[in-house]
Image (tube, helix red, strand yellow):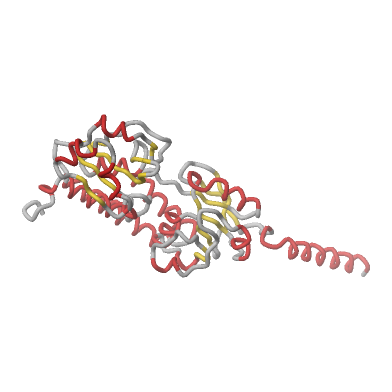
Amino acid sequence: MIKMWIAVAAAAAIGAAAFLAGPSFRPAGTTREIRDLDGRSVVVPVHPRRIVSIVPSCTELLFAAGAGDQVVGVTTFCEYPAEAVSRPKVGSIFLHIEALRALDPDLVVSSHDLAAPSNEKVRGLGVPVLCLDPKNFADIASALRLLGEVTGHRETAERAAAALQKRISKIASRVRCPRRPTVYMEASSQPIIAAAPGMTADEVIRLAGGANVITESHAGKWRPISWETVLARDPEVIVLVHEYGSSLEARAGWDRLNAVREGRVHRFDKSHFLYPTPRLAIGLERLAEALHPECFDAKAR
C-alpha cells in the first residue's frame, strides 16, 4: 500500500511539473523535424494552431497556403490579404516581444534575411521559428507547399503553387522576342536600391524579356547603388516600384537617359514587385506587357 501511494505521489509530481512548465512542455509525438527552403532543420508542432507571422510576405504566403484561420498575430505592415489586417499586432519594424508572448504562439513564421534579431528573441521564448526567404518563383511555390505541409493544408497549398507555376509559364511562353531591352528597376530612392541578380525581381526582369543593367549580386537582396552607375549603364527601360518618383526629374542627367528620352519610364504598384509571394506574377505580367506590348496585343492573344 505504501509503495502504491509513493507511485501515485510521484506521478502527480511529474504531472504538476509538466503543467508548470507551460508552453515549452511538449509531450512526445507533438513535434516533428522539417527542413526549411535553405535546408535548415526546424522542429515545429505537428498541428500548429496559433501561428504568428512577423514578416508581410510570410503572412501573405500563410493565407495563400490555406492557413489563414491559424494566424493569430501579425505586424502593422501585414496589409494583405484584407483578413490579415484585423489580426492582433505584435509590432512593426521592431517586434514587441510581450505582445507576442501574450498570444501564446506555437509557431512563428519569419524571414532569416529580414528579421534575424527578432527571430533570436522568439527562440529565446522557446517558440519555434520557421524562416522563408524565397529567391525566385520556384522558391515561392516551394514555400507554399512547405507551409501546406506544416499547417495541414496540403491540397490548398498545392493548388496555389500549381496555379502560380501555370501562370508564370503562360506569361513566359508569350515573351519569345529575341530583342531584350536593358532594364533598371528601382525600389527606393533614399537610399537608391535596385534589383540585382539572385533575387525575385531580377528573375521577373528576365522572364518578362528584359536584361537587368545591374549585374552585381547582393546576397539575394536589393542592391544599394549610386546614381552615377545608372547614368553610366543608360538603361533602355526604367521601372519604379516605390512612391517617390516625382523627385527623379531633379537628378543630374535624368533627361539624358535613353529610357527618359524614349518615354519608357514605368511606375508600378510596389506590392507586385517587392514581396516574394504569388502576387509577384502580377508584376511579371505587367512588366512583360510594358517591355513587349507586341506579344500581348489582341492579335497575339
Q: Position of residue 273 (x, y in %)?
A: 32, 50
Query: Which quadrant of the figure has residue 147?
Result: bottom left
Look at the image and tell me in which quarter the C terminus lies.
Answer: bottom left
- Residue located at (48% from left, 44% from top): 113
In front of the other: 269 or 154: 269
- Residue located at (36% from left, 50% from top): 274
In front of the other: 57 or 240: 240
In front of the other: 177 or 94: 94
Q: Count the marks.
A: 0
Look at the image and tell me in which quarter the N terminus lies.
Answer: bottom right
Give above or below for 46 relative to 36: below
Left or right: 4 in relation to 180: right
Q: Position of residue 109 (x, y in %)?
A: 51, 55
Question: Residue reaching furthest right?
Answer: 2
Left or right: 247 in relation to 60: left
Query: Which quadrant of the figure has residue 9?
Result: bottom right
Give above or below for 221 relative to 270: above
Q: Position of residue 236 (x, y in %)?
A: 19, 37
Left or right: 253 in relation to 270: left
Q: Position of residue 67 (x, y in %)?
A: 45, 63
Question: Residue reaching furthest left?
Answer: 299
In front of the other: 160 or 223: 223
